[in-house]
Amino acid sequence: MVTVAIVLRAEKKKDGKYPLAIRITKDRKSSFIYLDYRLKKEDWDADKQRVKKTHPNSVRLNNFLLKKLAEANEHALEIEANRNTVSPQSVRQKIKPTASATFFGQSDLYLQRLKEAGKYNEYTANKPRIKHFKEFIKNDIAFPDISIPLLERFKSYVITQLKLSERSAVNHLSVIRSVFSFAVKEGVVDKKHSPFGKGKVKIKFPESSKIGLNEEEIERLETIELNDRENHVRNLWLFSYYFAGMRISDVLRLRWSDFQNDRLYYGMGKNQKADSLKVPDKALAILKQYEVFKENKGDLVFPELKGVDLSDQFITKRTIAFKTSAIDKCLNLNVAPKAEITKKLTMHISRHSFAQMAGDTISIQLLQKLYRHESILTTMGYQSNFTHEQTDDALDKVLSKKPKEKSNEPK
């Protein structure tokens, strides 16, 4: 008789977790079907073959495991009823979940994990890119069949057929690499099948120009007359600028309790790097405009996220994305023309503007602290987009050269 059970395998993975599998046994010979999940040992009840309540997704996982166990038992009984001899391998072949081991099976799981982790921006950006790859391939594909020539053809397709930029094409390849890495981590595919890495496909983004506002443009932005809505989005932009180009996602999350003793204490959402900054007088003037709406110290300073469940990361990031889009639209269509600014004006440009104003007048170590960069190399790379004095001087030196006067002395 064939017996089927859900087990936690003994091989510990790099993340410290163990893979779940269906074990099929006949005459003391076993075969295993690996599922798409891993657990810590303390979250698994081996006797009951259930995920313990200590796991945050125990209910969903247990429902999934019960379904898989029922399917496996059903297939085993079906084979036993129709054959005289049954092997664990024959049962495994019948119920092996091959679909989830393919690229698009894994990409679905990858997107699901992004959504569960509240990574709205990554989820919404990567979903259409995977869809484009599926439209290009037309069918599902095994990981080993994703070759270097195939990816080169896909990159060309994105640029020539979808009419997208070189940077967008590289982003399409990047998400394919992410799904590969996800599948390797899940134990679905061997790393040797990856078409990415040394001597293979390299992910290299083209350089893009970063242009901020200059002193005159910022002064005009600070002083022009605007209506209430326009004044609010201007306040958000300037507030970001006054705090070294603080990201809009962090600006909108600020609470009154983050301001203590004329300093702002906050952890940057992108890398949770915490620090404090002196509140500039110009930023204090903006805060005063919103004090009338303050209900308590824990209240949000700006209105965009009021009423949003901030414990739900996916909903929060989705709301931030929608609000940022509306803010950028108002900045570009309404505020910029009134300030006689012809450059693109978005919330992100406040960061570029601070970097441009800083130039090479502030040490790279201080800029790293202001930008909250993990690595000083990141700061150096970013700031190099705005430091042009040496190259400008070199160009002037060459172009200002005059021909040497010819000597009238006889040879």
Image (spheres, rainbow, N blue to C red):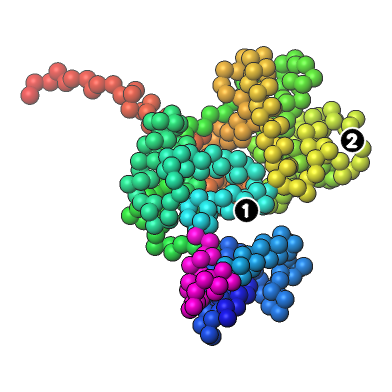
Overall secondary structure of the magenta section: helix
Mark 2 burial class by Cα count in 10 Å: few <14, some 14-19, many 20+:
some
Q: Amino acid at mark 1?
A: Arg
Q: Amino acid at mark 2?
A: Lys
Taking the magenta stretch, the answer to whether it contains residue 95 is yes
Q: Quadrant of residue 16?
A: bottom right
Q: Quadrant of residue 408?
A: top left
Image-based side of 5 in relation to 165, left or right: right
- Sooner in the amino-acid sequence: mark 1 or mark 2: 1
Instruction: Give the vertical position of 23 relative to 223 (above or below).
Output: below
Identify the residue shown where x is 43% and y is 29%. 163
Farthest residue, direction bottom: 28
Mark 1 burial class by Cα count in 10 Å: few <14, some 14-19, many 20+:
few
Taking the magenta stretch, the answer to whether it contains residue 254 is no
The spot of residue 214 in percent (x, y) is: 58, 25
Image-based side of 361 in relation to 147, left or right: right
Q: In the rendering, which numbered label is found on residue 294?
A: 2
The spot of residue 226 in percent (x, y) is: 75, 16
Identify the residue shown where x is 76% and y is 30%. 282
Image-based side of 247 in relation to 179, left or right: right
Instruction: Give the vertical position of 88 relative to 198 (above or below).
Output: below
Q: In the rendering, which numbered label is found on residue 113?
A: 1
Q: Quadrant of residue 142?
A: bottom left
In the rendered structure, which segment of residues is drawn in magenta? 77-98
